């Protein structure tokens, strides 16, 4: 463990674990406050330079984005030859996954969360950051049940010099956009696709592209044939389906930006739709 970190923070119990990192609750005597600290063990990283770039980028990208009400704030970072430690705002251990795993949400509730998530994603995109792994497990909840987008370990900064696209397959099967799987260059709209998939799950309880194996899921994503099965969408409004079609849209040019999604009538009406619920 890095000495500079333990000089400033008392590390307490483990909160969670990811592929490369362990997250601890910690206390700063100087600030008299609790934080979360992600300690990334560099020996677990592959030799792939892309992995190492992402590791170095994570604290830089978090600093660039802070503060935002729906993005986990970074407080400190410590780099040593063996580990990288990121001290950040302490959230609940619960994630959006815990919220959607056992029940569907009402449209008003789904809209409340989708709006927070889209405002975080729109902020990233304004600063030319693409998160690339937006999924319920990477969205934390705080004690007031507000969402905080976390885990910028796969994020990329497109830079100032007008770079418009990124490449490289990153993401998680249910949530990843087709252009990523097809190995094409892609842009920030991959995050809008992922938020669309999350919204679909919130209102229906099931993912839009489902399969028994990763290959089957990928095939369905690439085909991008979006359906709203009656079994899961009975009583779900036509307005939210309209928004979903514009977010989970294979054609990147026609796919909404995060800002456009925030201005959709269903969002502006807080999920209380004016049109009749679709009873088919
Ligand atoms: N700021 C935080 N406050 C409270 N708990 C947190 C915080 N950050 C992470 N956690 C807990 O730790 C878990 C793992 O965190 P995170 O996904 O950031 O780790 P990771 O190493 O980046 O994982 P991945 O393998 O997805 O890259 C989360 O699901 C959550 O339960």
Image (cartoon, rainbow, N blue to C red):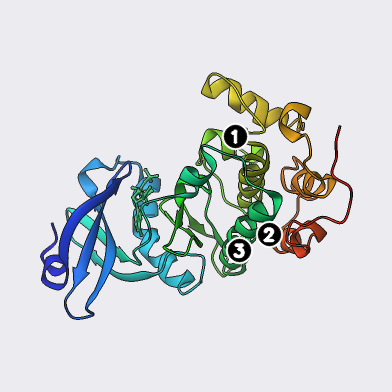
Dot 1: few (<14), some (14–19), or many (≥20) neighbours within 10 Å? some
Quote the CA–CA distance across marks 2 and 1.
21 Å
- Single out the residue that lies furthest toward the bottom: 30
Mark 3 CB lies closer than 8 A to ligand 1? no
Q: Secondary structure at mark 2?
A: helix
- Residue 125 is labelled as 3
In which image quadrant can residue 117 be found? bottom right
Dot 3: few (<14), some (14–19), or many (≥20) neighbours within 10 Å? many
Determine which residue is flagged by label 1: 181
In which image quadrant can residue 183 be found? top right
Quote the CA–CA distance across marks 3 and 1.
21 Å
Q: Nearer the viewer, mark 3 or mark 2?
A: 2
Dot 2: few (<14), some (14–19), or many (≥20) neighbours within 10 Å? many
The earlier-in-sequence mark between 3 and 2 is 3
Quote the CA–CA distance across marks 3 and 2.
8 Å
Left or right placement of residue 55 versus residue 138 in this view: left
Determine which residue is flagged by label 2: 258
Image coords of residue 65 (percent x, y) = 48, 70
Are the residues flagged by discs 3 and 2 in contact, CB closer than 8 Å?
yes
Q: Nearer the viewer, mark 2 or mark 1?
A: 2
Mark 2 CB lies closer than 8 A to ligand 1? no
Are the residues flagged by discs 2 and 1 in contact, CB closer than 8 Å?
no
Is residue 258 positioned above or below 127 on the image? above
**Which residue sits at x=20%, y=44%?**
43
**Which residue sits at x=34%, y=64%?**
90
Image coords of residue 225 (percent x, y) = 76, 30
Image coords of residue 42 (percent x, y) = 23, 48
**Which residue sits at x=53%, y=49%?**
132
Q: Secondary structure at mark 1?
A: helix
The earlier-in-sequence mark between 2 and 1 is 1
């Amino acid at each position: 463990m890095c000495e500079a970190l333990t000089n400033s923070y008392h590390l307490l119990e483990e909160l969670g674990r990811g592929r490369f990192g362990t997250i601890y609750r910690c206390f700063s005597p100087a600030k008299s406050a609790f934080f979360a600290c992600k300690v990334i063990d560099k020996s677990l990283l592959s030799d792939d330079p892309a992995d190492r770039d992402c590791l170095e980028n994570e604290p830089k990208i978090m600093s660039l984005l802070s503060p935002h009400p729906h993005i986990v704030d970074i407080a400190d970072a410590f780099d040593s030859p063996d580990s990288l430690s990121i001290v950040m705002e302490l959230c609940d251990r619960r994630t959006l996954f815990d919220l959607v795993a056992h029940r569907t949400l009402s449209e008003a509730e789904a809209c409340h969360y989708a709006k927070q998530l889209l405002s975080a994603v729109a902020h990233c995109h304004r600063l030319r950051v693409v998160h690339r792994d937006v999924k319920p497990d990477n969205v934390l909840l705080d004690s007031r049940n507000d969402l905080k987008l976390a885990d910028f370990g796969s994020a990329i900064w497109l830079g100032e010099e007008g770079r418009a696209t990124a490449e490289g397959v990153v993401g998680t099967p249910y949530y990843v956009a087709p252009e990523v799987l097809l190995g094409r260059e892609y842009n920030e709209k991959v995050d809008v696709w992922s938020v669309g998939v999350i919204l679909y799950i919130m209102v229906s309880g099931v993912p839009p592209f489902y399969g028994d194996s990763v290959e089957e899921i990928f095939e369905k994503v690439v085909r991008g044939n979006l359906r709203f099965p009656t079994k899961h969408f009975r009583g779900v409004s036509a307005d939210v389906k309209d928004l979903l079609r514009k977010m989970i849209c294979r054609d990147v040019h026609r796919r909404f930006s995060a800002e456009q999604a925030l201005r959709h009538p269903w969002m502006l009406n807080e999920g209380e739709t004016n049109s009749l619920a679709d009873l088919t």
